[in-house]
Image: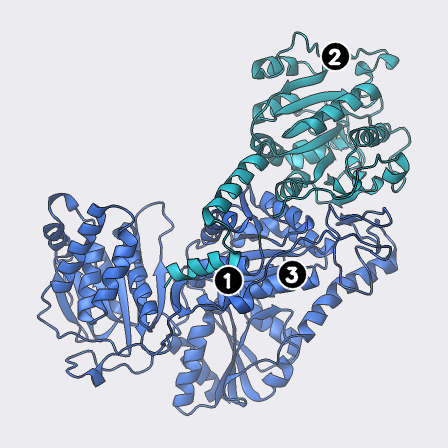
Amino acid sequence: MPPSTAPAHPDTPSSALRNAVIRLAGNSQDGIQSIGAFLGQLAGSTAQEVMTYMTIPSTISGGPSIFQVHLGSGDVLHPGDEADTLVAFYQHSYDNHLKTLKDGGICFYDSDQVEEIKEERGIIHIGVPFTTATIEAIGGSAKSRGKNIFVLGLLCAVYQLDRERMTEIIAGKFGKKSEDVLRNAMLAYDAGYAWPVHDIEHMPMAPGENVGDKRLSTDGNTMLSLGLIAGGVRFGAGYPITPWTTIMEFLRSELPKYNGMFIQCEDELAAVSLAIGASYSGHLSITGSSGPGLALKSEAIGYACMAEMPLIVVNIQRGGPSTGLPTSVEQSDLMQAIYGSHGDAPRVVIAPKNVEDCFYTALEACRIAREYSTPVLILSDQAIATRLEAFEEPDLEKHWREPALDLSERGEDFKPYPLDQITKHSPPGARSGVEKYPVVTGLEHDEWGHPSGNPLNHEKMTAKRRDKLRKLAESYAPTEVHGMPSGSLLFVGWGSTYGPIKEATDRMISEGHVVGAVHLRHVHPLPNDLSEVFEKYDHILVPEMNDSGMYGFGQLATLLRAKTCNAGIQSLNKVQGISFRVLEIVAAAEKLIAQK
Amino acid sequence: MSELTSAAPVEKLTKKQLKADHPTWCPACGDFAVLASFFNVVQKLGIPHEKICVVAGIGCSSRFPYFVNAHGIHFIHGRALPLATGISLSRPDLHVFVFGGDGDGFSIGGNHLNHAARKNVNLSYVVMDNFVYGLTKNQTSPTTPLGRKSKTDPRGAIDQPINPMAQLVASGATFIARTHAAQVKHMNEMFERAILHPGFAVVETLSECTMFYPGAFDDGNPRKGGTFDLVDEDTQELDSISAAMDLSQDLSPGKFGVYYETKRPTKNELERAWLSDAQKSVAGKSGQDILRQRFAAMR
């Protein structure tokens, strides 16, 4: 983490905090996620940066859960290696999470619930009776409801956050429900805000630096859904699976406003089939899932490669294989996304690097699917899907794509599968000027869509389907390097490791290392200029949240070695169901550099 | 998605316009008659050429789209119905026809049959049931009668065959008929009624595999010494589930005709109703403006 000022006794604004990592530990029904969501929304609307991280138990209701919020006045690239402040709701929360608190950090605990305190590492303990104080504030029958809002008030006071704006946000959230609910929330909030915390002084956050009147704060699945809408998707189909489900819930409710439709299906096979049906009909359509569901869709995705149908498939990765760690993060579906079909079935795979990028990745997926008449997989993951970030609102004037159904009459020269051009299908409803209608097919076919077992035709058609993706790779902008353009080590990453890798790079540069970082959105096909970029560094290190496999390399690293034949490519793998900490990446890089 | 009406005048299609590749079916396969019947009915109903959409999965009968000169899509095994559902829901202007066999529809695609039926998706589905896997050359199918020998049941089939009619009734299909490919006039009538039915319409068509299961449907063919008994629509309550279940009890050869017919809102209508309500609620705002409003709520 960048050096934040010492938390104790800041008397002047110059000593105000630039960063604060707050870990809330409780049970999933305590509403700790909403404390995080409120803080996130506040950060977004007060020019601050925010990134959150949460764990959810995969049980039906209840179970230990945490929500970590990293607030910053400047850039916030990761949810925080260690917490500055821990809020513990129960003894088990305290016992399990005290180790995540930094030396000298502050621990607020519910003195109604936590009985045993460990004095260690200079940690400042502040016991506050969250439960009884909330009941007293709201009145008799409140039970434990509302204590999350009490804690929110407490944190706002401690960090001197914008009290007025927070009141507005709470009113916006609860005002829709009923007057009682809003009144109780305000009583709990005010009680928390006013709670005397004698043991420490308040620690004001420095004002945010990301001034802009159109800043949003939301999670990755929401932003991905909105990107799909802006990119022209008007039809989708899916089946519920964590953590993909919130996209289908969102699109099911939202698409009708845009004259579109999202259908819940009986299974994953039906979902991808419905989406291909709508694509065939001339609408850009989407299906999606998480690991196990993607496996079920594989055959139909292979069909879409063969039949050259535009299609968007979202995969929100989680820990695997099989049911695995359904509510934890992992990046182990890369190979499945690229190769998960029988036969040679080339498709495009792109990955967003953070919540904001979900929007732009979705837009690009729409564009590629249309232009290249191919399935495009968007590989997001559980961390990006569920965490909150704040960023500038996208410019719709620039990015909006109004969908259009092309039912123009096709002429004499129309062929569904021309060898010398990229396929552009004629959807049903489009007349044929020569009364010859195409069949779209998964059998190997000639240019007119007739089944063909001709050996040379199969080779030519296989090349046609592959060459269009080579053409796509030729169209990429040159690969951008963050940090030093040449030197001792280059990080290469993809997906949600972006933040920790970037921060590790910045920290190492500030400590005198000559390092750079490349973050790939286009994971398949890979950019053509990677070899040249890699040659400028002594070591290439690929941090990935997947296993090092049989041969010692993660999934992207394996592909990079195959693509560039660069023997300097090494892997840093982590499969704990949690994101990389910055210091883990720095340590691995320093070790590699020291090896020489 | 836009509602469309054909601007071009509807002229009656000729058989020549509708014919495509010569079918690859074996000589005397029952499926030839199904194809001829489809041409007849499409011609009679005056469906605009470009609005015909022929969908199939995998199997002998699922080669159907190649033999019709119309927009067609040949999909993967068992998923023709969900694919057709995507077409039907997103393009209400089209006439969606699904063709397939007993393996495709009742075995690998069995789950989709139940759900397309209960959702009452607007399309016509012809199951060309031959009681055997033909394309893979004589394995037991989900409708193969008990005791019938095949390459996968050399001692005779031991698994209880499914009862397609009872299953369709139980699943909530809104038009269920049964016909025989050797009874052209009756088949024409069933196809026509299925196409005109608003909702999920299935016609189970007994279509003989002359190569691997010759004579399978002789008991329903008077020319081969069988009986072709029709459902008596004067006495049969067409919208009674229990009456349809009673009819479904004996299918060897059983009765031919409409087993069940009822009106229920289609999935297409119900989804469109939501769309039009949503359109009213946004009151003519552009998509961009709706999204901007959404962004504003996220600040």
Decide: is B184 above or below B136. above
Residue drawn at point x = 35 percent, y = 60 percent: A54
Residue at the image position 65 percent from the left and 13 percent from the top: B247
Residue carrying label 1 = A380
**Most foreground residue, A27 or A365:** A365
Q: Which mark is residue B230?
A: 2
Within 10 angstroms of label 1, few (less than 14), some, or many (20 or more) residues?
many
Total number of numbered labels?
Answer: 3
| Label 1 SS | strand
Cα separation, mark 1 vs mark 3, equals: 17 Å
| Residue A259, above or below B243 | below
Q: What residue sits right under mark 3 in the picture?
A: A369
Q: Where B294 sits versus A160, above or below?
A: above
In the figure, the shade used to draw chain B is cyan
**Three-letter code for the amino acid on which mark 2 is drawn:** Leu
Q: Amino acid at mark 1?
A: Ser
- Near mark 2 (Cα within 10 A), the count class, few <14, some 14-19 or many ≥20, is some
Of all chains, the one bearing label 2 is: B
With B76 as the anchor, is A119 left or right in this view? Answer: left
- Work out whether disc 2 and disc 3 sit on a shared chain: no
x then y, percent, for residue A438: 80, 49
Left/right placement of residue A583 relative to residue A313 reads left
Q: Nearer the viewer, mark 1 or mark 3?
A: 3
